[in-house]
Every structure is written in C-alpha cells, then in structure tokens.
Image (cartoon, rainbow, N blue to C red):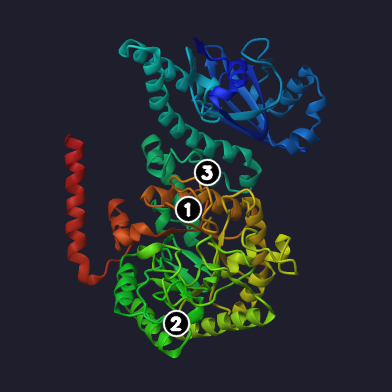
C-alpha cells in the first residue's frame, strides 16, 4: 500500500515509531489561495503594511487559475490580527494588500477550488528516517517536503512514483523494491531539501533584505537556494546579469562603469586600506615555525599566494606569547626576531604584488600545548606540555589538559601581550590586524558558554562573556594606527544546543562594531568536539549574510567556498563583502589569476615574469572551450 496523504500525514503519524519522522515546524505563517489572475511565470510580490511585510508566491496552476500563496513572519501575522479573522475576512485582507497585482480578480479559498483550506499554517519540513514498513511505503510530502518557494513537491512525488514502479517490476520482492526506492530517492531528496532549506530561510527573513536596492534584492532572491549560480543566471538571462554586473561595479568603483565586471573583481575599502578585488587568502596554520619564528617556508608560502592575485593575504594564527601557541610549531610575534622575520615577508609582498597583508593575532587558550595537525589534531603533546589558560576550567575535550581559569593578573598579562603584538605588527608593516575570537581559542573560550563556566562578571550572560574579549579588542585598537582597519573572527554558532546561536552572533558583531571593528570574519564551530555542523557548499555563508544585514557591518565569508561562482554570487548578493578561500589556495596559489582568465577578465595584473604563462594558459582555455563546443 502506498501512503501519500500529504505533509500532515495521519499514516506517518500513526506509524511514527517505524518511520521515525523528523518534522521541523518553521516560524512563518502562510495561506494557500488561488486566483483567476494569470501569472505566466513564477512571480514574487512584496508589500509593506502597517503590520509588517507580506509577500506572495504566485504561479499558473492550470489554464485559467493561478496559485497565490501569501506568507509573512509571525510578528506581522499577529499584529494584523489574522488569528481572529474568519476565513472570508482573511481572504479580504490579502485582496486588499495585493489589490494592485490582482487587476480586480478575487482570491479563491483552496477549500472552494484547490486542495486544503484557507487556513494560515506553519510549514513543516518533513524528512523520514525510514520510508517503508512491511507492505506500506510512503511517497511525496508524506515522506519528505521541500518548500513551496522552489515549487518541487509535485516533481519529487512524481519521481518517487516512477522509481518505485520501476523497482517493483525490476526486483522480485516488495522489500527489495522498497529498499532500493528508499536509498535511491533519499539522496535526491536531501539535495533538493538543501536547496529548499536555503530558499525557505531566505523567505523567512524577507525584512532583512528589503533595505537593498532593487537590483541587488532581485539578485539575492534569484540566488537564494544556492542552486542558481552567477553563471547559471548568465545562461538564463545574459543581458540582465550584465546589467547587474555593471550596476554592482559602478557602486564599488564610485563611478559609472561601461562594461560588465565580475563582482569578485571589484574594489573594496576598509579605512585607508584599498583592496583591488574580493578574494582573500584565509588564515591557515602551517605548523612550520621554530620557537615562533617564521622562516623561508613562510616567505615562499605567503609570497606565492600574494603573487597569485588575491587582494588580501591573512597570516596563520600568530601567537602573542610562547605559551599562547597551539603547538610548538606555531608562528609567533613576541620578540624582535619575530618582527624581523615577518617584516621580510610583508616587505616582499608589498614590493612585488598589489596584495595587502593582515596578521591574525591569537592565543590558543584551552586548545594549546598540542601536537601539530598531521601528528594528532587537538591531542596533547607526548612530552613538554606547558600550562594552559581559559575562561573557565572546562577542558576542550576529555583528552586535553584542564585549563586554569584566568584571574585578574592573567587577564592583565594576556591583554598586554596582545597590545605588544599589535605594536610589533605595525613595526612589521601589516595593513590590518584580525583578533581571533573563534574556534574555542582563548578569547572564544570567554564567548562560548560551552567553555565558560565562570560565575563572576566575565561569565553567565552574553554581555558578561563578551567583556574580556572587548577589553582586549579596545586595548589593541587603541595602539593600532587609526587609518588601518581591524577585523575580528567569531564562531557564529557552536553547532550545539547549549552553545552560541546565530542570533547571538549578531549581538556579538554589534558589540565589536560599537567598539570600533571594521569587518567581521564569520566562521563557525570548532568550539567543541561534540559539535554537529551541517556541511555543504558555502555552508557558513548564511551566518555572514545574517550578520551583514542585521548588524549592518561588512563581513568576510568563509567555509567551503571554492568555485568562481561561489565568490561572485556571495559578493553580488550582499551575503559578504569579501570571501576567504583556504584549501583552494593550498591547491592553487594562483587561484585568483586563473579565475580572471576563466572569466575572460583582463583587469588583474599577472607578475610580469609570468606573462608568458598567462598567454599559454589562456590559449589552452580557449582550445578547451572550442573542443567542448564541437562535442
């Protein structure tokens, strides 16, 4: 027997112990209506009312009828008093709000014409752990839901039916057919649900984006699911995308631009630091220093990536004292030798490239005194361990040392170490400082409740947990030249129920903004080995997007950003101002130069010594394109 009784399935509920449904009821309210006003394409309508924003997902349902789904945030729904309206009053309210789009047509209750009823509900995201039980199998919205904003529910259900029918004919038993159906369809379901989740989340936060100019708002809407990319938009509507690229570039350059420019190759400025593009080499520990001293490896490592076209090069986390290191092989900036070694690298980058150099200053805290990554990440040293500090007395993991909870003397000493490191960074010639307040290191250990069990003024409420990191930031900002920017890296979520949540990350960003930070480097997690992150392409970008829109501060996005399309779409949609790429730059130091050539953009300077390589590289690209067209 096949059960396909919809997203509120009674069959699924009755056999919940077998099907193990995971139902996530989303916050927004929506009502499914119809109209005789015909919409020839998937159409989105947005209207602001005295109660808040309301919006519509409309599309042709049949030859003379359109689906008309009205959605809003719960706050607007409550303020409008819809809960206390009759069905007819609720429909009349929607007709009034969207009258200018209906051309005199009425809205039709689903109870009268379509499926369901004219009742406002919350969308349940459904995903079952098991899709069949004995001779019963689930299909369509009963077993999985996408979201009406991407309109794929019917598609999924039909594909479910086709695959199941084929399996019943192919396999000798229902059990084998059901197992094949479940495993094969689950993967496609997860892919679509990932896109649907992104789209759904965008619509849940429409008021977050309404301050955008119409061009960028439309781009953000079109790319919300992350399945429609920058180049995919070019295939769909080349003229519109080029208009968007010119619009974006004109605002970045501060004057009208005649030709379309890839968003990733537009300039960006923080205080007096001017960046030629939006590509950043992310901080990456290389565990190759001796007693904190960087060497020729680091010169080649950073020099190569600076020559590769990225506009900003971050150092690895550079520690402010010997006992602040993650491992014995970590880089430092706590004596005159370190200054000379770093200055040599910075001077080379400035003399030979257009890149800027940022130093990430940090203290390992509870994650200190451990082995280098490839010998055992986060594992204590076999011998020679040094005492470690933290906000509280919670070890990072059962195998790590129990740290000392910092007292007033410790705080004063560490703050002074950060200040001295900042002064040394200026002597090195760095263009920007980033304070590492993420990933469970010392300053992060104050912010996350997973590591902070203090009961004094530095523990408990978020305001208290931010107190010491803000003190350190202000002390560093006071000695760092006014014309040079500062960044702070944060973990926007701990990926655990008892940890920092994304809405708190906005408050963290606002606090640092008030203290004078110029940009927030938005990372996530790594504050507990128990974390349960949700991985995927650009999986941390939504946190950057939220902080940028709600805290109204520039951000750097990081986390599985590896394609040209990723950078262009993130920047153009306003989800971040800069994109940090880590592993792609380990695999290809010239990632940015290659990205320019692949897009046919000639506005990035190659080192003159490598121009012959550029010419050959572009000839090979052109030949590959010709061969692909011929095929």
SS at mark 1 in the image: helix
Residue 336 figure quarter: bottom left
Is residue 50 shown left or right of residue 360? right
What crowding class fits label 1: few (fewer than 14 Cα within 10 Å), some (14-19), or many (20 or more)? many
Residue 70 figure quarter: top right
Q: Nearer the viewer, residue 293 or 89?
A: 293
Marker count (numbered): 3
**Rendered view: 51 above or below 388:** above
In percent of width and height, residue 387 lies at 54, 77
**Rendered view: 273 above or below 108:** below
In percent of width and height, residue 600 lies at 29, 52
Q: Which mark is residue 503?
A: none
Q: Mark 2 highlights which residue?
A: 429
Image quarter (top left, top right, bottom left or bottom right) of the C terminus: top left
Q: Nearer the viewer, residue 304 or 145?
A: 145
Q: Mark 3 highlights which residue?
A: 220
**Rendered view: 630 above or below 338:** above
Query: Do the residues under discs 2 and 3 have CB atoms within 8 angstroms?
Result: no
Q: Nearer the viewer, residue 281 or 265?
A: 281
What crowding class fits label 3: few (fewer than 14 Cα within 10 Å), some (14-19), or many (20 or more)? many
Q: CA distance from mark 2 to mark 3?
A: 38 Å
Query: Do the residues under discs 1 and 2 have CB atoms within 8 angstroms?
Result: no
Work out whether mark 1 precedes mark 3 in sequence or the reverse, and give the earlier one.
3
Q: Mark 1 highlights which residue?
A: 571
**Rendered view: 508 above or below 146:** below
Q: CA distance from mark 1 to mark 3?
A: 10 Å
Q: Residue at position x 53%, y 39% from top? A: 198
In percent of width and height, residue 465 lies at 68, 65
Is residue 108 shown left or right of residue 312? right
């Amino acid at each position: 027997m096949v059960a396909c009784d919809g997203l509120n399935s009674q069959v699924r509920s009755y056999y919940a112990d077998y099907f193990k449904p995971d139902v996530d009821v989303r916050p927004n309210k929506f009502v499914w209506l119809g109209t005789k006003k015909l919409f020839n394409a998937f159409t989105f309508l947005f209207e602001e009312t005295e109660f808040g924003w309301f919006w519509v997902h409309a599309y042709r349902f049949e030859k003379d009828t359109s689906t008309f789904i009205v959605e809003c945030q719960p706050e607007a729904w409550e303020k409008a008093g819809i809960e206390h309206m009759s069905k007819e009053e609720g429909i009349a309210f929607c007709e009034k709000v969207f009258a200018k789009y209906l051309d005199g047509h009425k809205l039709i209750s689903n109870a009268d014409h379509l499926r369901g009823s004219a009742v406002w509900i919350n969308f349940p995201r459904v995903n079952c752990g098991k899709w069949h039980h004995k001779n019963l199998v689930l299909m369509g919205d009963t077993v999985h839901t996408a979201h009406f904003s991407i309109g794929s529910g019917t598609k999924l259900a039909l594909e479910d039916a086709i695959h199941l029918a084929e399996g019943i004919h192919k396999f000798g038993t229902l059990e084998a057919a059901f197992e094949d159906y479940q495993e094969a369809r689950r993967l496609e379901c997860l892919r679509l649900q990932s896109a649907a989740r992104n789209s759904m989340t965008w619509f849940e936060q429409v008021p977050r984006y309404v301050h955008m100019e119409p061009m960028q708002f439309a781009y953000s809407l079109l790319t919300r699911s992350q399945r429609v990319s920058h180049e995919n938009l070019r295939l769909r509507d080349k003229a519109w995308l080029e208009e968007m690229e010119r619009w974006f570039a004109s605002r970045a350059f501060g004057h009208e631009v005649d030709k379309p420019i890839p968003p990733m190759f537009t300039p960006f400025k923080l205080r007096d630091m001017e960046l030629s593009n939006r590509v950043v080499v992310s901080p990456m520990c290389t565990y190759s220093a001796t007693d904190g001293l960087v060497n020729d490896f680091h010169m080649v490592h950073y020099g190569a990536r600076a020559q590769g076209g990225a506009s900003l090069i971050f150092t690895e986390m550079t520690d402010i004292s010997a006992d602040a290191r993650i491992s014995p092989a970590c880089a430092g900036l706590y004596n005159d030798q370190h200054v000379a070694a770093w200055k040599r690298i910075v001077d080379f980058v400035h003399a030979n490239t257009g890149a800027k150099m940022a130093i990430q200053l940090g203290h390992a805290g509870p994650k200190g005194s451990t082995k280098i990554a490839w010998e055992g990440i986060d594992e204590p040293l076999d011998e020679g361990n040094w005492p470690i500090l933290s906000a509280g007395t919670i070890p990072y993991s059962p195998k790590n040392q129990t740290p000392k909870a910092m007292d007033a003397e410790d705080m004063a000493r560490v703050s002074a170490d950060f200040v001295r490191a900042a002064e040394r960074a200026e002597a090195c010639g760095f263009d920007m400082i980033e304070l590492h307040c993420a990933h469970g290191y010392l300053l992060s250990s104050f912010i996350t409740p997973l590591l902070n069990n203090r009961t004094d003024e530095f523990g408990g409420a978020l305001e208290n947990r931010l107190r010491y990191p803000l003190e350190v930031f202000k002390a560093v900002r006071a000695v760092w030249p006014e014309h040079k920017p500062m960044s702070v890296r944060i973990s926007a979520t701990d990926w655990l129920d008892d940890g920092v949540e994304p809405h708190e990350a906005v408050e963290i960003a606002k606090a640092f903004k008030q203290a004078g930070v110029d940009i927030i480097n938005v990372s996530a997690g790594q504050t507990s080995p128990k974390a349960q992150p949700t991985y995927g392409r650009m999986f941390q970008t939504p946190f950057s997007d939220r902080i940028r829109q709600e805290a109204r501060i520039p951000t750097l996005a990081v986390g599985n950003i590896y394609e040209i399309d990723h950078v262009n779409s993130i920047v153009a949609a306003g989800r971040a101002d800069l994109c940090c790429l880590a592993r792609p730059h380990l695999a290809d130091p010239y990632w940015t130069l290659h990205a320019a050539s692949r897009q046919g953009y000639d506005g990035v300077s190659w080192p003159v010594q490598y121009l012959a390589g550029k010419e050959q590289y572009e000839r090979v690209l052109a030949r590959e394109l010709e061969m692909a067209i011929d095929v």
